[in-house]
């Protein structure tokens, strides 16, 4: 069975400081992993995805994530937070592609 | 290119009534998904279509929920009869080729309130 755990429901950072959003997964197979972002009153948007290629994945807006099989983790990072990064972030796992499991989300606040 | 369209954006109904949501995916996208997002939770996949066929509907409550994509383009999701716990945002997404690597493009969602 697959599942996703986002370890922090809320994260606050100051503008210009690093961002770390944590995600752990469980999967019986080699998973595909995604991070999506949801800004208020906007649709979900794909930030990046891992599909068994390079373990360090670069996405849009300066975000990246590293797949660590030994730790079953796929944490999202950004070196320097911007005010526009304030949003809800979802970690997603899929193995067969027939089911996609979303985490409960992490709300990121960026303090000016 | 135009994004995924959904209507209505908001709907308020009483319990035991029926309701239908409509989704028009991005042109050329073969795969269409319906998700339910309850407040404070991540989206849950209800059903996935590949063209006009169902790929997975294992999490669709089939006693009250139904969905169709008759011509392999737009889709409708229906709830009949609605319950209070169906209050949620219903999201539609589409993907060019589906599968675990396919990027999903999401619509703005329909917010349903059941009173």
Image (tube, coloured by chain):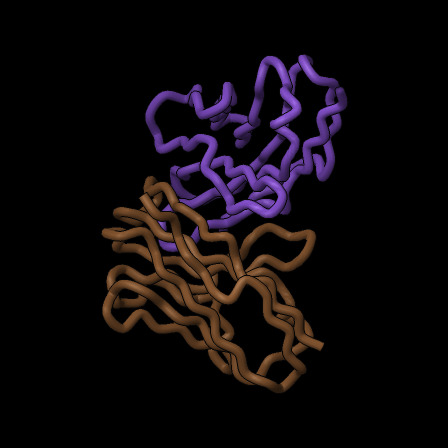
Measuring from the top left, give residue A53's x and y in whole percent.
33, 25
Measuring from the top left, give residue B100's x and y in whole percent.
35, 44
- In the image, residue A92 above or below residue B80: above
Residue B49 location, quadrant: bottom left
Q: Residue shown at 25%/67% (left/top)?
A: B52
Residue A79 location, quadrant: top right
Q: Choose between B86 and A8: the one closer to the eye.
A: B86
Measuring from the top left, give residue B28's x and y in whole percent.
23, 51
Provide the letter of the chain coloured purple: A
- In the image, residue A87 above or below residue B74: above
Q: Quadrant of the C terminus of chain B?
A: bottom right
Q: Quadrant of the N terminus of chain B?
A: top left
Q: Residue shown at 48%/39% (left/top)?
A: A45
Q: Residue shown at 64%/78% (left/top)?
A: B13
- In the image, residue A48 above or below residue B59: above
Q: Choose between A68 and A18: the one closer to the eye.
A: A18
Q: Choose between B101 and A72: the one closer to the eye.
A: B101
Q: In the rendered view, does A62 fall on the left or right side of A111? A: left
Measuring from the top left, give residue B76's x and y in whole percent.
40, 71
Q: Residue shown at 47%/76% (left/top)?
A: B78
Count of all numbered marks drawn on residues in the image:
0
Provide the letter of the chain coloured brown: B
- In the image, residue A52 above or below residue B8: above
């Amino acid at each position: 069975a697959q599942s996703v755990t986002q370890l922090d429901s809320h994260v606050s950072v100051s503008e210009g400081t690093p961002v770390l959003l944590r995600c752990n997964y469980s999967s019986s197979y080699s998973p595909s992993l995604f991070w999506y972002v949801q800004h208020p009153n906007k649709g979900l948007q794909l930030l990046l995805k891992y599909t068994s290629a390079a373990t360090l994945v670069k996405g849009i807006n300066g975000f990246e994530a590293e797949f660590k099989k030994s730790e079953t983790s796929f944490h999202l990072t950004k070196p320097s937070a911007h005010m526009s990064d304030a949003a809800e972030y979802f970690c997603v796992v899929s193995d067969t592609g027939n089911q996609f499991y979303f985490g409960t989300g992490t709300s990121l606040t960026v303090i000016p | 290119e135009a994004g995924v369209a959904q209507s209505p954006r908001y709907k308020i109904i009483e319990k035991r009534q029926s309701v239908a949501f409509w989704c028009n995916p991005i042109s050329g996208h073969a795969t269409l998904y319906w998700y339910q997002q309850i407040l404070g939770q991540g989206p849950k996949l209800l059903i996935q279509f590949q063209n006009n066929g169902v790929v997975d509907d294992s999490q669709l409550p089939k006693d009250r929920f139904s969905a169709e994509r008759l011509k392999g383009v737009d889709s409708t999701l229906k709830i009949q009869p609605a319950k209070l716990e169906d209050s949620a945002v219903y999201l539609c997404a589409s993907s060019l080729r589906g599968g675990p690597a396919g990027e999903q493009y999401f619509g703005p969602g329909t917010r349903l309130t059941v009173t």
